[in-house]
Image: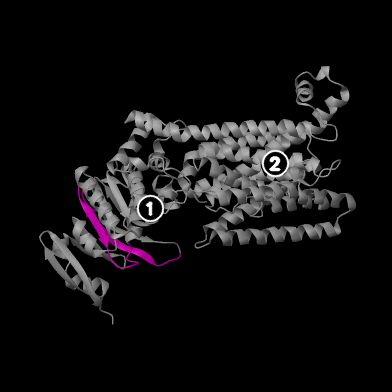
Amino acid sequence: MATTSKYIYKHITGRKISIILAMAVVAFLLFLLDVSVGPAMLSPGEIFRSIFLPQSMRKVTRFIVWELRLPIALMAIIAGASLAAAGAEMQTILNNPLASPYTLGVSAAAGFGAAVAIVLGFGVVPLGAAIIVPVNAFFFSMLTSIMILALAKKKNLSAETMVLAGIAVLFLFHAGMAVLEYFAAEEELQAIVFWMFGSLSKTTWPKLGFAVMVFFVIVPLLFKDAWKLTALRLGEDKAKSLGVNVERLRLRVLILVSVLTGTVVAFVGTIGFVGLAGPHIARMLVGEDQRYFLPASILCGSVLLSTSSILSKIVIPGTIFPIGIITSFIGVPFLLFLLLRSKRGFW
Amino acid sequence: MRVTTENLKFFYRNEKQVLKGVTLEAVPGELTALIGPNAAGKSTLLKCIAGVEKTRSGITFHDGVNQGHRDRKNRISYLPQDTSCKALMTVFEAVLLGRLKNLAWHVGNEDLDMVMKALKRLSIDNLATSYLNELSGGQKQMVAIAQALVNCPKVLLLDEPTNSLDLRNELEILDQIAAITREEGITTIMAIHSVSLAARYADKVVILKDGMVHTSGRPNIVMTEDLIREVYGVESRIITEGPLRHIIPIGSFRK
């Protein structure tokens, strides 16, 4: 029996590991392509030499790679990963296939918080001008997440109703943004537009470093609860009977994903769809075991945002198309294709 | 492991009291059926014993140990009413989750073997790599039972295990539950709607009405036409055929 059970388990998990490794390779290749694509096309060799042997390259190439392309390409990887991880866990803890930072209004709330800091110079915590923008974004995303959790706890609240509530929140914060835009000066208006469309172009190494740090602090904490989160998909009562403190797990995970979302939105604005499509694609590929589902979601998010980043540079040569629009254009058809093709059903 | 509740009371937040002082006893190797009309408190009672709901007053004892004892969760398996799990996972993975408290990042051989044992016990090992949403209602219920058995429980709490199953699946699943209960000396408490099935399979029935125990005892003694009329408001005929008692509803008493 030991051999049979081990063989079956290896058969199930082996396939998932292969898919995750293949996705990691795809994400890496897309990252390289993202660095190479732009007004000045660079070969893979030039990229490698610029990264590992910078002295052997011309100053201008080094500048393009290190100052212009690498931070943006890496931010595409980390922002996509963070949004997809947040979406994956929101879908899990709320037991809602339509949950994502964007559809539940969390991203819009973070954007509004940032706009408040930009236009009014008001920070929920009295800190320096540079730091109040992400802090506000985080605070407002947190506030919205807690509101969603309170709503979710109400009985008989269907998945659709929750998303409708999220859309209401989204409109509320968009209306708030519109008010701020009305009173904003030209430069401030430009900064707000950046938030609403979502853009990787303002990435700097310190911002990237902060986003990476938050990601590597939060994600291991999510992995720590991998089995409990998987058990939650069996239903709340079943999870409770297995010893999971569901209320505490939900609150903890919601706080963690709010930190992830708030940080990313603070730096790249509201990029929709990655947090919704990434986890769904991952679920169809590797199933619901969070030990595989979470890394697969993270990689799907990175792949989606890297692809969008590449397309944003080549759709209209010489200009960078808003990335939020691209994510929807590639994410929606791909998700629909998978939904129609899937034999095992969906959610 | 003996399960005893003494004057167990429970109410949901801002709602009327569901359990108004339930006292019952279930013993190892016996199948105790909880029956009664809708909203009698059957599911809530099971949830309280399982620890899914925290009791506000009244205590549940297992072998004289307080319900809050750490080992309680290891000894009790609970099968909720709704087992229509929509998670995209295989049967093997779903049953493995029944051993949640043992699971580490790397799953040990013992856990894998226990899963296989539970699947084989219910003769569904051929479904190990099938996805849950590819299964029929009866197969899904078998998987849920395997999940409840994978920890070798001392107490098995089943809430409507034959819910929405056809006649054949209903009998097959109850045959399995009765056999496992007796062969492995498990204390099984099962909430069930069908009085006929309760009379057929249970060693003891506990009839709940309005959050209280109306009657309890051996089915062939306590389940009478008068009792059915009093508890359900339904006229019935009871036909005895060897060891079996068939309860046939005739019509509603409330007409």
Residue at 37% x, 33% y is: B112
Q: Which residue is found at the position 45% from the left and 36% from the top?
A: A12
Chain identifier of the residue bearing label 2 in the image? A
Q: Observer-nearest residue: B105 or A144?
A: B105
The amino acid beneath tag 2 is Leu
Disc 2 residue crowd, few under 14, some 14–19, many 20+, Cα 10 Å: many
**Which residue sits furthest right?**
A186
Q: Residue furthest left?
A: B242
Q: Is residue A72 left or right of residue A296?
A: right
- Which x, y percent locates residue B157? 31, 51
Residue assigned mark 1: B136
Name the amino acid, label 1. Answer: Ser
Tell me the SS state at disc 2: helix
Residue carrying label 2: A305
Which span is picked out in magenta? B14-41
Q: Quadrant of residue A298?
A: top right
Q: Residue at x 85, y 58 (%)?
A: A183
- Measured in 3D between alpha carbons, the distance from the residue under mark 1 to the one under mark 2, in whole angstroms, is 39 Å
Q: Estimate how packed mark 1 is, as few (under 14), some (14 to 19) or many (20 or more) residues with alpha carbons within 10 Å.
A: few
Horizontal side of A253 relative to B87 (left or right) equals right
Q: Is residue A245 visible?
A: no
| Residue A192 percent coordinates (x, y) | 81, 51
